[in-house]
Amino acid sequence: MSQRWLQEIVNLDGVEGVFIASNRAKVIDKIGLDLKDSQLEALSLRILRIIAGYHIKSQKVNEVEFYWQNLYVIGKVASEFILVTFCKTPKVLSLLRITLNVTMANILEDKKFIKVIKDHVADRVFSLEKGEIDESEKNLISKLK
């Protein structure tokens, strides 16, 4: 299904791994990562919180980029999922962005993947947890006001 497209991302020099997470912060697919799904889900939840913060201020986010555990992280945002990539070096980021755009387009055209992701779409019942906001998140949110 999406393994082919994720493998193209991992084949780039400097890319450690990539995963797809639903809007419920559940890992759908991953390649090249030694991290546990629980760690990836916690990271996904933080990315979704960042996106939600911008959404509250009526600002659209297509991509989130930050530094986490000695890795550069780029999260591409789609309406039903996020595509998160880990890199060792910032030198690969420009080529990676082009590859991510192509990958997102191909994944969004994959009917089997869309059918799988529709089962994971967040609804009004699912909400991002309000607890566990640390100081760095509070600092980011305060800058949006």
Image (tube, rainbow, N blue to C red):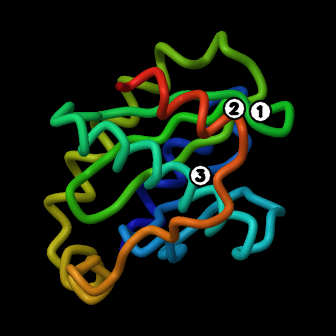
Q: CA distance from mark 2 to mark 1?
A: 6 Å
* Quarter of the rendering occupied by the N terminus: bottom left
Q: Amino acid at mark 1?
A: Leu
Residue at x-position 36% and y-position 68%: 23
Query: Could you tell me residue 37's position as x and y percent?
Result: 70, 74
90 left or right, relative to 80: right
Q: Which mark is residue 71?
A: 1
Give the total of numbered labels: 3
- Hey, what amino acid is under mark 3? Val
User: Badge 3: few (under 14), some or many (20 or more) residues near its Cα, within 10 Å?
Assistant: many
Is the Cβ of the residue at disc 1 closer than 8 Å to that at disc 3? no
Q: Is residue 109 above or below residue 85?
A: below
Please provide percent x and percent y for residue 137. Answer: 61, 39
Across and down, in percent, residue 39 comes to 75, 66
Element assignment for label 2: strand
User: Are there few (<14), some (14-19), or many (20+) residues within 10 Å of tag 1?
Assistant: some
Residue at 25% from the left image edge and 44% from the top image edge: 56
Q: Where is the C terminus found, in terms of image quarters?
A: top left
Q: Residue at x 61, y 44 (%)?
A: 10
Q: Tell me the residue that label 3 is attached to.
A: 18
Which element is circle 1 on?
Answer: strand
Query: Is mark 2 in CB contact (under 8 Å) with mark 1?
Result: yes
Counting from the top left corner in percent of width and height, residue 66 is at 62, 28
Q: Which residue is mark 2?
A: 87
Question: Distance of mark 1 from mark 3, alpha carbons?
Answer: 12 Å
Q: Is residue 141 left or right of residue 136?
A: left
Density class for disc 2 (Cα within 10 Å; few <14, some 14-19, many ≥20) is many
The answer to whether mark 2 and mark 3 are in CB contact below 8 A is no
